[in-house]
Image (cartoon, helix red, strand yellow):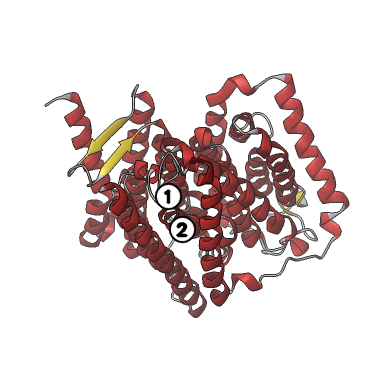
Amino acid sequence: MELTELVSVITVAWVALPFFVGFSIYLLPQFDRLLALSVTLISATYAGLLFVARSPQTFELIDHFGVILIADSLSGFFILTNALVTLAVLLYCWRSDKTAFFFTQVILLHGSVNAAFLCADFISLYVALEVISVASFLLVTYSRSARSIWVGLRYLFVSNTAMLFYLVGVALVYQATHSFHFEGLSVAPPEAIALIFLGLLVKGGIFVSGLWLPQTHSEAETPVSAILSGVVVNTAVLALVRCALVVPEVEPIVRLAGVGTALFGVSYAVFEKDSKRMLAFSTVSQLGFVLAAPAVAGFYALTHGLVKAALFLVAGSLPSRNFKELNQQPIARSLWLMGAIAAFSISGLPLLAGFGAKTLMMKSLLPWQVVAMNIAAIGTAITFAKFIFLPHSSTVTAPKKVKILWPSMVILLGGLLVANFVDIDSYNIVNIAKAVGITIFGWLIYLGIIKKLSLKLPSMFERLEHLIGVMSLSAIGLFLLLIYVSAPSTSSAPGGLG
């Protein structure tokens, strides 16, 4: 067997493993935690192999219009994020009363997310995203409360509606190219790209189409929120990044969506007083940072996933979700320290991976993006100052939840420390001064203005009836934007982007 064939077999076996193990948990419920843990460790190992490999591996499993997988360093970053976040969540739930059903859904979700990270064709990506939707729904509704069931059904309805738009776009791509490969976008009609991108933007929780995300992620149980915001949203984001990298004609659209999302999400996060909703809106914003610079999306997604999972777990251990109440009573210093380290990283301060990721992202921006993304970076510093400036004391007794947090924090915060060495070249006087300056400026705005305000942006557009309407308007907006972008090149490529 040749090396390429061997790697292909290993990849297919690795993709199938979580589904086999997940259903096996029902037969061996006494080993549910150990079986789930083994899958995440294997995923981390596979991600490591992708970084060691010199060149990307492409696998065409059926024929020219069938299943196409790409295993490279880009997918390696996303797979590693999935492995570390899922591992941290499993450790967090290790001593809980979670049933075998919960661990089964976590591993099925883990496996379908891994599959989505390798997909390079629209049909296999569709299958992976639909499995992700079902597993996410079952985890969101795990508590079986009336509220969780409503939020889960709302998420499922929005997701399925978005995927209908997506499928119509995929059909139009196949009609134009007789292939489902991402590269077919280069000759696809604008309406096909608009529909596919709409589906991916909604699934990823990006820009106005992502207003379903805050309520879904904030109302889910703490470990589920950590997985949803740290990993699941990345599946659609990576698909958009790959489209931008293989089809240069759509890259400006992806970059523009990134800038708009970064500003839109942080605008809500800055004024949000509920800790979990603030983290969810911040997820929307940070996905914009990932999309704004596709070439370095993998590293930024890794640092964001680790930070967001850590902060959701910390938020679940705080005595209240309301920052006004939290600012009136000190919390345990150990709990504050966990949240502060993660907040330092996402703010872009040196010695943590967020600094290198944000510096690389800023270097990869186009000139028209720079001002907007720097404003979004200041907004990020303002947002996470809410965690950094929480009152804390060594005399306050830490809640029992903090004890179960430490193993997870070792994984997540340790990952931020280790990943800091990925881009040592970022450490120069200019970059350090800029990062520290932006962060301090954001802190001053928070302490001098935002902390004293009671302003809250309207949430009416988060209602279900408005979500579908916004989705339709977004499709029209995307179509008009694509018509504008493709206009100069229509003579060279009729019906496509040129």
Residue at x-position 24% and y-position 46%: 67
- Give the amino acid type for the residue marked by disc 2 in the picture: Lys
Location of the C terminus (image quadrant): top left
Image: 435 above or below 66: above
Q: Contact, CB < 8 Å: mark 1 with mark 2?
A: yes
Residue in view at x 75 percent, y 50 percent: 392
Disc 1/disc 2 C-alpha distance (Å):
8 Å
Q: Is residue 92 above or below residue 298?
A: below
Among the 4 quarters of the image, the one containing residue 413: top right
Q: In this view, does 440 lie to the left or right of 296?
A: right
Residue 373 sits in quarter: top right
The amino acid type of the residue labelled 1 equals Thr
Numbered circles on residues, count: 2
Q: Is mark 2 on a helix, strand or loop?
A: helix
Q: Can you give x and y, in whole percent of width and height, for residue 415 in the image?
A: 51, 35
- Residue 268 shown left or right of residue 311 in the figure: right
Which residue is nearer to you in this view: 393 or 141? Answer: 141
Where is residue 370? Give x, y as percent. Answer: 69, 36
Out of 5 and 302, give the one closest to the viewer.
Answer: 5
The label shown at residue 235 is: 1
| Residue that protrudes farthest toward the right in the picture | 448
Read off the residue under disc 2.
203
Residue 406 seen from this side: no
Residue count near mark 1 (Cα–Cα under 10 Å), binned few <14, some 14–19, many ≥20 = many
Q: What element carries label 1?
A: helix
Mark closest to the chain's N terminus, 1 or 2: 2
For the question of whether residue 11 can be seen, the reply is yes
Residue 230 lies left or right of residue 271; in this view the side is left
What is the x, y in percent for residue 281? 62, 57
- Neighbourhood count class around disc 2 (C-alpha, 10 Å): few under 14, some 14–19, many 20 upward: many
Instruction: Return the residue found at the far left.
Output: 1
